Image (spheres, grey):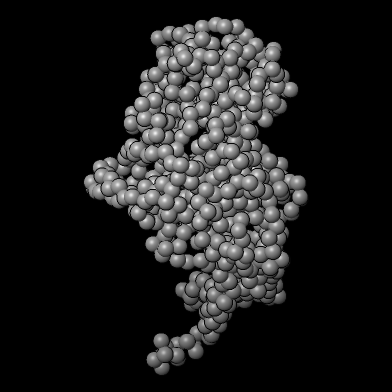
Amino acid sequence: MTFLQPLLLWGLPLCLIPILIHLMNRIRYRSVEWAAIMFLIKANRSSTSMARLRQFLILLFRVLAILVLIFAVARPLAGGWLGWTFSGPPETVIIILDRSSSMGTQYSTRISRLNQAKKIIPAAAKDFPGTRFVLIENVNRKPCDISSPDILPSLTDTAQTQTSSDIPSLVDEAVNHIITNKTGVTEIWLASDMQTSDWQPENSKWREIESKAKSLPQSLHIRILALDSKGDENMSVRLIKTNPPRANAPQEAELVFEIDRPAGSETVIPVTLAQGENRKQINIKLSGTLNKFRQKITKGENISDNSGYLELPSDINQDDNRAYFTFPVQQEKKTTIVSSDNNVCSQILAIAASPDEKEQANIKFQQPSAADLIDFKDTASIIWLAPFPSEEVQKELRQFISEGGTVLFFPPEKDDSTKLFSSISWGDCEVRKETEPISLKEWERRSGPLEDTASGEILPVGEIKVSKIRQLEGSGLNPIAAYADGKIFLARLKMMGGAAYFCTTLPVPDWSTLGEGQVLVPMIQRILAEGGTRLSKTVFAECGSWDMELNSSGTKDVNIKENKDPRINSGVYRSGDRTLVLNRPASEDLQEYIGTTELEGIFRGISFSTLHEKSGRDASMSTEIWKAFLVLMLLFLVSEAFLCLPISFKTKTKKAGFQ
């Protein structure tokens, strides 16, 4: 329970007044023994226990009457989200608003999760007129003071987006704001649909947040508004890849896309294919939950004619019903392998990066000592097969990754204590018995370097046998694949437009069977393709991941009629001589939600409470209940008065028929 006037709770000791009066009255009288008293005691012994119980109840009702009166004047609030904490209004409330693509899912009332959050938060804040409110949302990710939560529905920075959310980074930003600005008694109100991919329970940043929160001079409480209703009627479409034209058909390319839906019977749905000004309907047969298809497209005369989208029929989430595309342009992808010598491992990686002998010229080897001479401008991806570099080279790598490049780090043969980006380091090398190699148990199959093939086949990741593992330590790492014992096999560190990947074993026989190629080749090719987008004239990327590129005012929507914002909306955009095809992140299609157990692990040592909003109807979060306490006080006083009546009066009342 929250109180609007918590200082009045200091009056609670007044509840002891009836007890003190009772004790004082007992002290006033002296007991005098006289001869006939033994006969009176014997005569009244049967009524003594009832008299004591009556006196105890009278005293109890007097104490309770004063107690509920003090509660009433302190103006208590009750509600699932703000209830049951004996504290006053906080000095500062930081509102973290998840406005990712999945927050566009609608309730049965046809209100989206995001809009419901923007109704609930102002309703909860109406009783805190003196509180300062700060907004942090998942696109700008910077704290911003707002005059009142009432303006949330009208702000452009709270509109629906087709991006993903990085909840650990948002909470970290909030805690940093508390530390920097010394905000006093502060609460964090976090509105999210609890998607596992957004919360990233395994992200090491949660432990950093825990350490910072515990170092605060004041207590911190996090209130979570979980808008985690499951949309059983929702379907989504996603572009997996665009196959470039073949030599014998230069005017024709192929789209590979998938349609995800809840389990259901076999059915046929109409899918709209829009390219330029042309529209046509394709009838597609769905037979399972995840269905993959291929569709031919032809080259147009200009960028507008080359661009378009696939669209599903309307359902409870309009934001996942479109997948955008454009006619692809082939681009050479150069790779640099940093290795101290041209050994077996580096040769295996070179073949995996360029299986076609005709493209071997795109592979370049570089000594670690001369890593500063890498042509970062024309390189798509870097494979690092050496100890972590010096601080100067790390700065160049950070810039390279931020601009959209990718770096794949493999562990060094020998121990190395050098830290990468001030937080990541290689640990001890674990050597397993030859007869007991470890295998991989879990990995991301929907997206990333280890995702299933376009035809739906699963990569044989589980068949890899590993004999040597070098532990990986650091913050901000997001595991992509893990061994059977839960330790990391492959991890990703996102940095603006690009990413750094870390593999904890080597593709050579005495370390693992990774070098056999069934997994290594597609893994490296996908990482290379990801980094190659920074060099291509046609960029396929996730919405929200091209911040540096989109800061330019010259980025325009190819579809003039829609004129969308490339920072938050999927679509096809023109930026200078480059074409950007932005689609919502694949992780936003996953209907996987974290539960209470995962939250307790995330907020270990941090006070938090959760309200699950599943109806989409009630926007009220707290209610003043002082009137109920006054009613209770009256009931206690009436009960006390009744017990104080003389016994003879109650007997007459009963005989008169009033009981």
Residue 552: percent from the left, percent from the top? 65, 45
Residue furthest toward the left? 266
Say which residue appears at 59% left-offset and 18% top-offset. Answer: 336
Query: Which of these two is toward me, 48 or 346?
Result: 346
Residue 319 placement, left or right of 126 = left
Residue 391 placement, left or right of 448 = right
Say which residue appears at 61% left-offset and 56% top-offset. Answer: 157
Is residue 123 placed above or below 523 in the rendered structure?
below
Query: Which of these two is toward me, 457 or 62?
Result: 457
How many numbered dots are placed on residues in this image?
A: 0
Query: Which of these two is toward me, 418 or 22?
Result: 418
Residue 348 shows up from this direction: yes
Residue 540: percent from the left, percent from the top? 50, 37
Residue furthest toward the bottom? 656
Residue 502 shows up from this direction: no
Say which residue appears at 48% left-offset and 57% top-offset. Answer: 113
Say which residue appears at 52% left-offset and 24% top-offset. Answer: 332
Residue 361: percent from the left, percent from the top? 53, 14
Query: Which of these two is toward me, 43 or 509?
Result: 509
